[in-house]
Amino acid sequence: MRDDRRYLRMALGLAARGEGQTAPNPMVGAVLVRGGHVVGRGYHTRAGAPHAEAIALAQAGSRARGATLYVNLEPCCHFGRTPPCVDAILGAGVGRVVASLEDPDPRVSGKGFRALRAAGTKVTVGPLAREARRLNESFLKRVVAGRPFVTLKAGMSLDGRIATRTGESKWITSPAARAAGRELRRQHEAVLVGVNTVLRDDPRLTARPAGRSGNGSGPRGVAGQPVRVVLDARLRTPPGARILTDGAGAVIIVSLPGAPRARRLRLEQAGALVLEVAGRDGRVSLDRALRELGRRGISSVLVEGGSEVLGSVLDGRIGDRLVLFVAGRVLGGRGALPVFGGLGAARLRDAPRLREVSVRPVGNEVWIDGRLVFPRARG
C-alpha cells in the first residue's frame, strides 16, 4: 500500500504538468512499475494528444507485461480523438491497475474498471482519492454538476470596498497583486465580467504569460489565454472594446433573448460569439450562462465582477472558491462601492462561509484564499 501511494504521487505529479493545456479533458498521469522499477511514465499534454497510459505503455514496450499501472483517473474505454486506453492496457498484458478515482464521465463511469476486471486484470481503486479530486476539481465539477468550477476574485480595501464614493477604483491594489490576479486568469479556462466593467474600465482580461503557448485544441483562446465572457443582457458592449480588438483570444457575450439584432450583428462581425440565455428582471441568469459554458467544454471560470456580478454569484449559491486581495487602505463612506452587491444574506446563518482558508502576503497586501460553503437551503 505504501508503494501504491508512492507511485500514485508520481502519477499525480506528472498529471499536474498538463495544467492549463488539457481542457476539456482531465489532467492524467501514468506510471508503469515492474519488479520495483519504473519502466514507463507519461502524462496527457493536450486534448487530442495520446493519453498518459498510452505514452507510458509505449515507453515500457515489452516490459509492460505483468507490470502495475498507476494512474490518477480511471482509464477510458471509448473511442474519442484517441483509441481506448483499456484496450492498450489489455493488449500490453499489464497485470494490475491502481487508480485513485473513477471517471464520472458517462462514457466511462466504471466501465473501464469492469472491462479490466472481466479480462483478469487486478484493479485497485481509491488511494490518494482526495488529492486526485483536488487536481481535477474543475473537470469533475463540469461533468458531475453540468457547470464549470467557479472562482470569485476581487481586489478590495480593508473595509471591503472596490471603489471610492466618486467611483475611482484604479488602483486599489498594487502591481504585485494585479500580477497575481493575471496568474489566476492563466489557471482558468474563462474569465467572466459584467458589461458595466467593460464600459467603465475597458479591460483586456488577459493572463500572465506562462512561459509556454497554448495549443488551440481546447476552449482556450490564442496563446493559452482564457476565453473572455461578458454578461451583457442588452448587448451594450462596444465593438471597439479592447477584448474584441486585441487579438488575445475568444470572446463570448451572453445576452437575453430578443436583444437588438443590429447590435448582435456588429459584435459578431467584431469576432464575438453571442449566446442568448434566459433570465429575469432584465438580467441574464448566471446559472444558465455557466451551464451553457459547461456545455461548450469550459471547466473553470474566474469571475472578476464588478460588484453586482460578484454579489449575484453569492446570491445564486454558485461559487466554489473565493480569492481576495486586500490592500492596506481604508476608503470609508456609505457611498463607496462594496465588493459584493446583490441582495446578500438576510440572516447570519444564511451567509456563505470559507473553509480550507489560506492567507499569505503579496507585497504589502494580503491574499485570502478559501473554499466557499453555502448553508443548506431551509424549506
Image (spheres, rainbow, N blue to C red):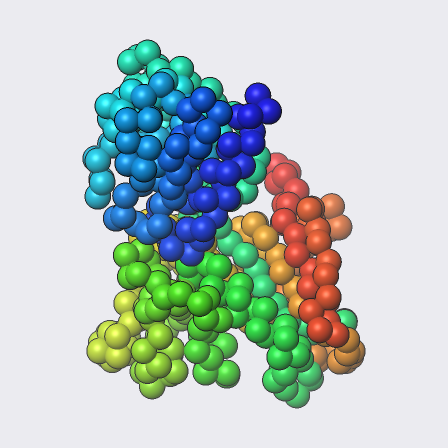
Q: Is residue 366 left or right of residue 64?
A: right
Identified at 35% across, 81% down, the residue is: 246
The answer to whether any part of residue 269 appears in the image is yes
Q: Is residue 173 left or right of residue 273?
A: right
Q: Quadrant of residue 129?
A: top right
Q: What is the x, y in percent for residue 234?
A: 37, 73
Q: What is the x, y in percent for residue 327?
A: 72, 74
Identified at 69% across, 60% down, the residue is: 368
**112, 137: nearer the viewer:** 112
**231, 7: nearer the viewer:** 7
**Image mark count:** 0
Q: Quadrant of residue 91?
A: top left
Quadrant in which the N terminus appears? top right
**358, 351: nearer the viewer:** 358
Identified at 33% across, 26% down, the residue is: 64
Residue 172, compared with residue 216, is above or below; it is below
Q: What is the x, y in percent for residue 281?
A: 46, 63
Residue 345, compared with residue 171, is above or below; it is above
Q: Is residue 359 left or right of residue 155?
A: right
Q: What is the x, y in percent for residue 284?
A: 42, 62
Residue 355, compared with residue 41, is above or below; it is below
Quadrant in which the C terminus appears? top right
Identified at 68% across, 72% down, the residue is: 156
**283, 340: nearer the viewer:** 340
The answer to whether any part of residue 70 appears in the image is no
